[in-house]
Image (cartoon, grey):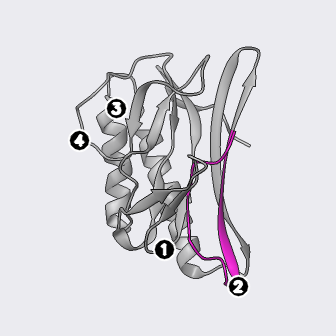
Amino acid sequence: MPSRTASPTTTACASDLVSIDCGAELDGWTGDAAISFTVGTPRPADLELIAATQQALDAGIAAAAVGHRIGDISHAISTVARKADCGMPADFGGHGIGRQMHEDPHVPNHGRPGRGFPLRHGLTLAIEPMLMAGGRNDYRTDPDGWTLRTIDGSRAAHIEHTIAITEDGPRILTLP
């Protein structure tokens, strides 16, 4: 599956920040995961952006509990992004996943706690924060329909896991 990740508009530097988003199907079930990493000598700001994106994912996963709502996940992600002074592409986020790659419900990366679809045991979600350095939310989509680029050329990172919501808490299904 093609990557749907924000990326910089320029690459002439000592290092690149790369995001890869992959989906897989096995025995009729689908999983979705993404990673971000640097190639070459990493810029400290890139490592901070990747760390903030991981923290946003961790916060979103921690909020994915029976009895909570989609807005609790969304709020947890956006709280970390705001604290790190990162922007997020408003039209993108996670999704339900199971027999199909993109199922309901949509899991925005920003929202209000206590709102939205109720989380129940057995629900599977792909939670995928995309953070953009510099706090701006401006991006464009390339002609391929998948690749996102920040308008100002700032760096972006994307990390994703597929999780199952259980009575014992969220269970990550896409660990390496």
Among the two numbered marks 2 and 3 on one chain, the one whose residue lies closer to the N terminus: 2
Q: CA distance from mark 2 to mark 3?
A: 39 Å
The amino acid at mark 3 is Ile
List the residue tagged with mark 2.
14
Instruction: Tell me if I can see residue 85 in this picture.
Output: no
SS class, disc 1: loop
Q: Amino acid at mark 4?
A: Arg
In the figure, residue 2 lies in which quadrant?
Answer: top right
User: Residue 176 placed where, x, y %?
Assistant: 74, 43
Q: Within the magenta stretch, is there residue 146? A: no
Kind of residue sitting beneath label 2: Ala
**Residue 169 visible in the current orientation:** yes
Mark 1 lies on residue: 154
Residues at discs 2 and 1 in contact (Cβ within 8 Å): no
Relative to residue 69, is residue 47 drawn left or right? Answer: right
| Residue at the image position 69 percent from the left and 39 percent from the top | 1
Number of residues whose C-alpha sits closer than 10 Å to that of mark 3, classed few (under 14), some (14–19) or many (20 or more):
many
Residue receiving disc 3: 70
- Gap in Å between the C-alphas at discs 4 and 3? 9 Å
Distance from disc 2 to disc 4, alpha carbons, whole Å, reads 39 Å
Identify the residue position indicated by label 4 in the image: 112
Q: Which residues are magenta?
A: 1-22
- Element on which disc 4 rests: loop
Residue type for callout 1: Ser
